[in-house]
Amino acid sequence: MEQESQEKMLFQKYLDRTNKFLNITGMYLKEEDSNRSLIQRLRHRWFYCFNSICFNTAIIGQIGWYIEAIMTDKSITEITYFMPCVTLCFLGNLKAFYFVKYAHYVNGVVDNLKKLQNLSSEKQKYRDDVEEEMLKNGLRIYNMFTYMLVCTNGCGLLSFIIGPLLTMAVYYYTTSKIVYLVPFFIWYPNEKYVNYAFRRQFREIIQRHKILIDCVNLLEIIYTKSTLFNVATSSLIICVTGFNITTIDNIIVMMPFISFLLMALLQIVVLCYYGDKIMEYSLEVSNAVYRSQWYMADAAVMKDLLFLSLRTQRACKLTAYEFTDINLNTYARIIGRAWSYFALLQTVYGRKGAKNH
């Protein structure tokens, strides 16, 4: 009972931590959202709407600057300078919007996880040391990714804000002139062997498996469209950011791009890592059924195990709007494309530099 209570407290702790981060942008979790329309959810999230208006105003300004840069034949370094910021802004926009739009599905995921907590109460006495260690290892990995994401985003935000100030200070110190700078360019318009207890446990396992599949399906609905944009643009972000790092000589100006590169790499590897784990563990269920002593069970249980094995041979997965599966193979392809684009940019930049000389 004490262990069960600790697990529920731990789950509530992580849920509260997630809600604290969401409160910063106004995208908090509310049970009432299950019965609200999209307009009602937006009306109750006025702070999110305010942030979204300011956010999109800046994006429009950056797009305006980009159009102006192309029309005025600016250099490739200046044109690619703002791309990581705008691309990440679009990605954040999509993820935030779909989170609010599908808030009732998000509540469904939370409710399903709470149901799993209740279903796990009967399993506490059957849990061995190996399962306990797997649970602790999963929490360690989750905490590691959480702290890394917080640190990289915090460093990126600080370098984004402080970088122009430091550049202005250095320029003022060397020339005694004040030059106002912004972080990025923006255009401003002014039963034989199986007794009853086993059958009951087996039904609980089936119910647990259905809830887990439902959770993955809900996550697919919430994030599949924004994940497609994420996968499609990650190679571009990594490529252009790496190119900026190699072509910019000023360390202060370079620092935001290093943070952008770390953020781009980390957020896509987290997505692909957990997507890969979902596929791996869902297929392991079928292997576990095969390795069990199914041949010693009665006909009814063997039939149930057969249906379970057939269902679990089809991997449960997250996709980028069904264009590609989210796993580590996708991450490898993203990195490969990013390197190809980077090499192409370096070649084009080197040729232009040679012609200028």
Image: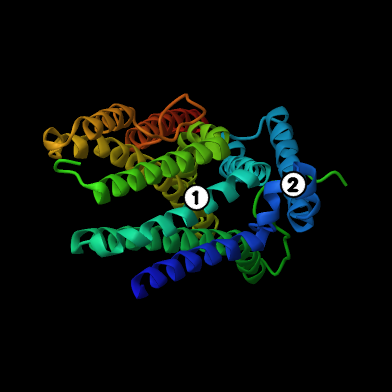
Quadrant where the image shows the N terminus = bottom left
| Kind of residue at badge 2 | Arg
Q: Position of residue 102 (x, y in %)?
A: 64, 42
Instruction: Tell me if 265 is positioned left or right of 189 in this view.
Output: left
Q: Position of residue 290 (x, y in %)?
A: 17, 34
Secondary structure state at the residue bearing disc 1? helix
Name the residue beneath numbered marker 2: 36
Name the residue beneath numbered marker 1: 112
Instruction: Tell me if 241 is positioned left or right of 158 in this view.
Output: left
Pick whichever, 12 or 44, lies toward us.
Answer: 12
Instruction: Tell me if 24 is positioned left or right of 206 in this view.
Output: right
**Up/down of 137 relative to 325, above or below:** below
Residue at the image position 77 percent from the left and 46 percent from the top: 57
Q: Position of residue 346 (x, y in %)?
A: 42, 33
The 10 Å Cα crowd at callout 1, few under 14, some 14 to 19, many 20 or more, is: some
Residue at the image position 40 percent from the left and 55 percent from the top: 119
User: How far apart are the two marked residues, 2 and 1, measured between alpha carbons?
Assistant: 19 Å
